[in-house]
Image (cartoon, rainbow, N blue to C red):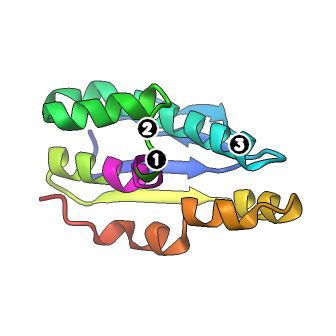
Amino acid sequence: MGKYAVIFLDFQVRCFLKPCRVPAYMKQRITGTSWDEMLDSFKGMVSKLYEEWKEYLWDSLSEKYQLTFRSLIDERASHATLRASLVLLTQFLGKKSGRKVIVLIDEYEAPNNCAYEFDFFKQVRPLHPPSIILKVDDINPG
């Protein structure tokens, strides 16, 4: 792996960077005309993200965190776990690598804009508040 683990998310087009691999790009629109549709698309994005880091992280996780990790991949995690999924992933990566994790998020406002347009903004807003996104780099992995 390079010096730092990097997670790059684009809520219009999502890609992930894996250690020593060519970046893989996938379209992942976080969208929907209802809360349920948007939540399903977010679960799908998180599932794919966790699946990409599974090989690198799995053996370093405790049994408890393996269950959490698996629940996110299988799209059956609780709302609280889903909401914390990016923070958890940065903690797992930071602990394994012994370094801070770089998280880049582009178009993070796209789900909010869509939810506002279709009148379910109040349900979407807590899913990824800016305070979590902006403070990810302050997480202590140990």
| Secondary element at tag 2 | loop
Quadrant of the snapshot with the N terminus:
top left
Q: Position of residue 134 (x, y in %)?
A: 46, 73
> Which of disc 2 and disc 1 is earlier in sequence?
2
| Secondary element at tag 1 | helix
Q: Amino acid at mark 3?
A: Asp
Against 99, is 71 above or below?
A: above
Q: Position of residue 31 (x, y in %)?
A: 76, 46
Q: How far apart are the alpha carbons under marks 2 and 3?
A: 15 Å
> Which of disc 3 and disc 1 is earlier in sequence?
3
- Nearest to the observer: residue 123 or residue 44: 123
Quadrant assignment, res 40: top right
Residue hosting label 3: 36
Q: Which mark is residue 77?
A: 2
- The answer to whether mark 1 and mark 2 are in CB contact below 8 A is yes
For image coordinates 66% across by 60% down, the residue present is: 124
- Nearest to the observer: residue 12 or residue 86: 86
**For this view, does 27 lie left or right of residue 18?**
right
- The answer to whether mark 2 and mark 3 are in CB contact below 8 A is no
Whether residue 29 is in magenta: the answer is no
Q: Position of residue 28 (x, y in %)?
A: 67, 38
Quadrant assignment, res 64: top left
**For this view, does 69 lie left or right of residue 75?**
left
For image coordinates 55% across by 49% down, the residue present is: 9
Q: How far apart are the alpha carbons under marks 1 and 3?
A: 14 Å
Residue hosting label 1: 82
Segment colored magenta: 81-89
Quadrant assignment, res 66: top left
